[in-house]
Image: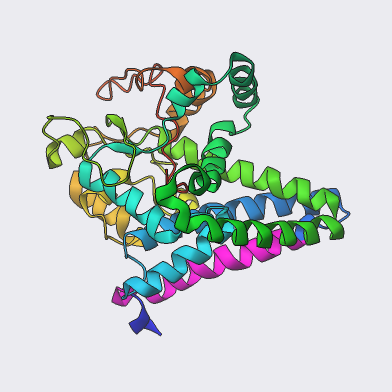
Amino acid sequence: MAAIYRYRDALLPNSAAIAYAVGGYALGVVLLCSHTGWIAAAGVAVLAHAMIIGAYLLHDAAHLAIFRTPEANARLGTVMAWLTGACYAPFSALRHKHMRHHVDRADIVTFDAKAFLLKVPVSLRRVIVLLEWLYVPAIELVMHGYVMIMPFLHPEHRAQRRRVVLVALIRIALFGALGWASPKALLLYMVAWFICLTVLRFADAYQHTYDAFAVLEGNVAIPDGKVRDRAYEQRNTYSNLVSVKFPALNLLLLNFSYHNAHHDRPIEPWYRLPRAHRQLYGDDDSQVIPMSRLLCGFHRHRVKRLLSADYGSMDVTRKQVDDFYGAVGVSFLTAV
């Protein structure tokens, strides 16, 4: 069994994480159908967290850091994409977009969320902004929607039309069955997914001060002459730890918050990232921003970051992050 994993010490942690994501997803859906309020609420929490772990397993599969073979990683990534609602694009497209983020050391998007907001009718923009103010991840929903309609808008993606239609029909049937069993469970499922998206975007928002580039196609070179070497990468990457005092709490995000270590060693498995961080930085916390310092800004700037021309300003040395707005629209769950 251990031989299927990329690393010799991966059997227990990877098997446990995969079992948690799949089992937690199934258990969460079952609990949503309960007529007892606290059990249904527990189902929302279990389902949301299983999706979060599933998303980060998808991320590690994109780095080929789980299994020995690319094919096995792709199969896992595809399963986790179905669990997290990222299944309308093939796993290869999700992986390609994320690898550009690492190779180019920039935020590469084919769908510019900020430009989109500036172009849409004012009434629609106000609706999206209101939803974001209400903590509905509207921009993430727009991006997922764009993934679905992109094959019908751009002829070069027409080969994906059949896939999108088939996936949509399957998901409609599955959600229809859940709604038939319990209309309340269908609503709670959406709440759990929104929680998952919000947690992921909170983590994503503060892990880089990279420049963002909107490119029409995934292979187009970024129009920039800046030196983007390893020093630039580490200087503009931050480890927004769930907890500094209690490192085990970072497992809640599968250690993804050790982001400097991840960028230093992109194929390092998730369970080794705390050690890699210590080896990389020791007692130097210059790139560490505890999430507790970011929660207030995430709340206060939840509308401003949508239209801001940059990520705001901060001074990591003095831990002045109150005006760090963060990124938006950089999810690794969408292939745009």
- Which quadrant of the view contains residue 92? bottom left
Identify the image quadrant of the N terminus. Answer: bottom left
Residue 29 within the magenta-colored segment of the rendering = yes
Q: Residue at x 16, y 35 (%)?
A: 232
Residue 47 within the magenta-colored segment of the rendering = no
Q: Residue at x 21, y 42 (%)?
A: 104
- Across and down, in percent, residue 166 comes to 61, 62
Q: Is residue 209 visible?
A: no
- The colour scheme applied to this rendered structure is rainbow
Q: Which residues are magenta?
A: 6-30
Task: Give whichever of 179, 25 is nearer the camera.
Answer: 179
Position of 5 compared to 160: left or right?
Answer: left
Identify the image quadrant of the C terminus. Answer: top left
Position of 20 compared to 74: left or right?
Answer: right
How many numbered discs sit on the rendered protein?
A: 0
Q: Residue at x 47, y 53 (%)?
A: 158
Task: Give whichever of 14, 164 is nearer the camera.
Answer: 164
- Across and down, in percent, residue 131 comes to 64, 26
Q: Main secondary structure of the magenta part?
A: helix
Above or below, 309 relative to 225: above
- Across and down, in percent, residue 27 comes to 69, 64
